[in-house]
Image (tube, rainbow, N blue to C red):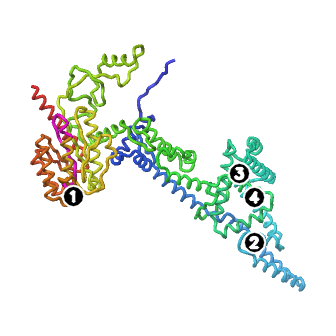
């Protein structure tokens, strides 16, 4: 049965394809043009974030780390872990005050009785009790221990103290068990006995696993699964959960001051008078520490809040802080978006919320999105632009530069138009990239049959395509000379110049495929560049602007071409270097007469070979203006004084006007 689809009018509420290769390439275009390194471009996007095609913001790692640090600060200021038993200490002081009042009352009543012997005994007993109370230590553990051996005068005070000790024992036992199970709350004596059985079975299961025996995990969970509401599905999952809780409990202890830690350990030793339980806890801790040494057992956190924090809540805070620390370390070390695929998105959602989790998930797919679109490929462990990626970057540069122009400035010229400037020649040829796609169907099918050897169906291959041969009405040959000297990046001129190079290459290869575009980079010396090298082209860390050598290379390149010939030069400084007769480079700043003369001599050679030189000057100084005036006077080309912001528009408009002029001239000659 054929699939059926239902369409509705777009009303703005539907979710489309939010992040595709085209929208991503727009985000990284300038970075790729500037450095030519997909790895660096994707790392920048990963750090800064981006917007998808619907305008929704995808949070970068910088924002994620900022939120993470804010959450950590919030947790650290949420309470005071060293004041867990402050309420107990205050209640104990109230009990001591009640006992003192009872001592005073008993002594007074004995004195009022008229019995001197009774009064003397009461005074001696009162003095002894007051001395015992005055000598009570300040810390909670030793104060409780002293009062457990004290003969109370007040029956109410003694009853309150015994209740307090029972509650303290329960609290300490609860504290111990909460290290193991999140379900250990409000435990009865029966629950405590069963918890001890669970811990013994748990230790035996771990040790069976270490001996290579069947740990009997399923049987353990059947008997004690209610202690683990997280419902672990494997022994490894269970042990990891336990290790996280016990490591957090140890980190909580590490976070206390030495005095607080000693007091707590002494109190727990007094209250936890169950040697078997303590042995099982120590046994479990040692087993888990050995199995999971990287869980942060030695970590600590500096809490600064004012409110006392119960142990269970503090344990959760420590676990969350440890998870935040681990996540921060991972994100700081992530070298590429692909590395983010290792992040536990459920943990990110729990720690930082849905927005951060969704953003990290989408960032992790950036590399794969570009690879699936054929824009990048991995070679020897590094990402590189494919030819298709290079074309996409060039088109994006071209689209960006044209997008800044008013439509009527170019006569509403559309760069997507195919095959302008060509006429059919009634001959055919094999298709090559850049050719106008005037398909010759008969020739194409004939090639397919010849390759396939007959039979149906016919399976076309790109090599089978045959197209009508075209003759170009007007052909131009251009060499773009780009200044790569150190002053270009220092003045923020390099990126606009390189973007022009890529845009011009895209324009010519897509709209004027029979035209020739050569590329020359010049600094201390000049060198010819291939189009596929453009993304990796960078400035040179040398001194010198050798226009003379650049003009020499450009002239030789154009000598092998036909049609009208021109050089487009982009520079921000006057010539300061030239090649001497012995082949050595001469450099001088300010430029000397020798360099100016050598450069203008090469300009004269270009002029004699009918090569026009159009110069686009960035940050033109008086010296550069003076030199360019001499150049244009000799060559009859044109000079443009422009800025980094307008350079691209100037170059493209001038090139297209040059093409229109050639077409008009060609039509007049034809008539």
Front position among marks 2 and 3: 3
Dot 4: element? helix
Q: Is residue 627 left or right of residue 126?
A: left
Q: Is residue 211 left or right of residue 667?
A: right
Q: Quadrant of residue 117?
A: bottom right
Q: Is residue 411 left or right of residue 187?
A: left
Dot 2: element? helix
Q: Which residues are magenta?
A: 557-576
Image disc number at residue 587 = 1
Residues at badges 3 and 1 in contact (C-beta under 8 Å)? no
Crowd band around label 1 with a 10 angstrom C-alpha radius: few (<14), some (14–19), many (20+): some
The residue to which callout 4 is attached is 173
Residues at badges 2 and 1 in contact (C-beta under 8 Å)? no
Q: CA distance from mark 4 to mark 3?
A: 12 Å
Q: CA distance from mark 2 to mark 1?
A: 87 Å
The residue to which callout 2 is attached is 143
Dot 1: element? strand
State whether residue 108 appears in this view: no
Crowd band around label 3 with a 10 angstrom C-alpha radius: few (<14), some (14–19), many (20+): many
Residue 571 among magenta residues: yes
Q: Earlier in the sequence, mark 4 or mark 3?
A: 4
The residue to which callout 3 is attached is 181
Q: Earlier in the sequence, mark 1 or mark 4?
A: 4
Residue 125 among magenta residues: no
Crowd band around label 2 with a 10 angstrom C-alpha radius: few (<14), some (14–19), many (20+): some
């Amino acid at each position: 049965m054929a699939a059926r689809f239902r369409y509705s009018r777009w009303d703005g509420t539907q979710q489309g394809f939010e992040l595709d290769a085209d929208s991503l390439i727009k985000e990284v275009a300038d970075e790729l043009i500037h450095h030519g390194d997909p790895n660096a471009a994707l790392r920048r996007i990963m750090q800064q974030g981006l917007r998808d095609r619907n305008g929704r913001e995808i949070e970068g790692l910088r924002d994620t780390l900022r939120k993470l640090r804010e959450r950590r600060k919030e947790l650290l200021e949420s309470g005071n872990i060293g004041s867990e038993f402050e309420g107990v200490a205050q209640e104990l002081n109230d009990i001591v005050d009640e006992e003192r009042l009872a001592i005073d009352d008993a002594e007074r009543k004995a004195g009022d009785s008229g019995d001197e012997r009774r009064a003397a005994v009461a005074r001696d007993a009162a003095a002894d009790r007051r001395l015992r109370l005055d000598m009570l230590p300040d810390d909670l553990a030793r104060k409780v221990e002293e009062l457990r051996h004290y003969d109370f005068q007040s029956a109410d005070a003694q009853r309150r103290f015994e209740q307090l000790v029972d509650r303290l024992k329960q609290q300490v036992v609860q504290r111990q068990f909460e290290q193991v199970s999140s379900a250990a709350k409000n435990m009865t004596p029966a629950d405590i006995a069963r918890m001890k059985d669970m811990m013994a079975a748990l230790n035996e299961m771990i040790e069976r696993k270490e001996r290579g025996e069947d740990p009997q995990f399923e049987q353990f969970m059947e008997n004690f699964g209610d202690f683990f509401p997280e419902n672990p599905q494997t022994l490894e999952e269970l042990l990891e959960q336990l290790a996280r809780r016990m490591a957090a409990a140890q980190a909580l202890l590490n976070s206390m001051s030495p005095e607080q830690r000693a007091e707590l350990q002494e109190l727990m030793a007094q209250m936890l008078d169950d040697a078997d339980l303590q042995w099982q806890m120590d046994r479990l801790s040692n087993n888990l520490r050995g199995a999971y040494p990287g869980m942060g057992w030695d970590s600590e956190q500096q809490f600064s809040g004012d409110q006392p924090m119960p142990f269970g809540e503090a344990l959760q805070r420590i676990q969350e802080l440890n998870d935040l620390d681990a996540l921060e370390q991972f994100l700081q070390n992530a070298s590429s978006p692909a590395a983010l695929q290792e992040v536990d998105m459920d943990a990110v959602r729990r720690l930082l919320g849905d927005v951060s989790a969704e953003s990290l998930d989408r960032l992790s797919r950036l590399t794969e999105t570009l690879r699936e679109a054929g824009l990048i490929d991995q070679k020897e462990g590094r990402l590189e632009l494919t030819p298709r990626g290079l074309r996409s970057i060039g088109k994006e540069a071209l689209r960006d530069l044209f997008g800044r122009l008013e439509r009527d400035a170019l006569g509403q010229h559309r760069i997507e138009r195919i095959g302008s400037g060509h006429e059919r020649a009634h001959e055919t040829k094999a298709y090559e990239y850049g050719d106008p796609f005037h398909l010759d169907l008969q020739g194409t099918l004939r090639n397919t049959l010849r390759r396939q050897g007959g039979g149906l169906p016919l399976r076309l291959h790109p090599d089978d395509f045959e197209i009508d041969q075209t003759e170009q009405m007007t052909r131009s040959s251009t060499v773009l000379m780009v200044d790569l000297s150190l002053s270009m990046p220092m003045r923020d001129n390099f990126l606009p110049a390189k973007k022009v190079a890529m845009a011009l290459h895209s324009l010519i290869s897509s709209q004027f495929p029979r035209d020739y575009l050569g590329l020359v980079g010049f600094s201390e010396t000049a060198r010819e560049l291939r189009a596929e090298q453009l993304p990796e082209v960078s400035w040179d860390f040398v001194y010198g602007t050798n226009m003379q050598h650049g003009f020499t290379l450009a002239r030789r390149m154009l000598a092998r071409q036909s049609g009208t010939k021109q050089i487009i030069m982009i520079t921000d400084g006057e010539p300061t270097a030239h090649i001497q007769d012995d082949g050595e480079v001469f450099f001088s700043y300010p430029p000397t007469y020798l360099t100016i003369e050598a450069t203008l001599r090469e300009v004269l050679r270009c002029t004699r070979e009918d090569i026009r030189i159009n110069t686009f000057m960035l940050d033109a100084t008086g010296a550069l203006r003076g030199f360019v005036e001499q150049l244009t006077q000799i060559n009859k080309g044109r000079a443009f004084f422009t800025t980094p912001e307008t350079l691209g528009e100037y170059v493209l408009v001038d090139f297209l006007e040059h093409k229109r002029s050639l077409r008009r001239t060609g039509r007049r000659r034809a008539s």
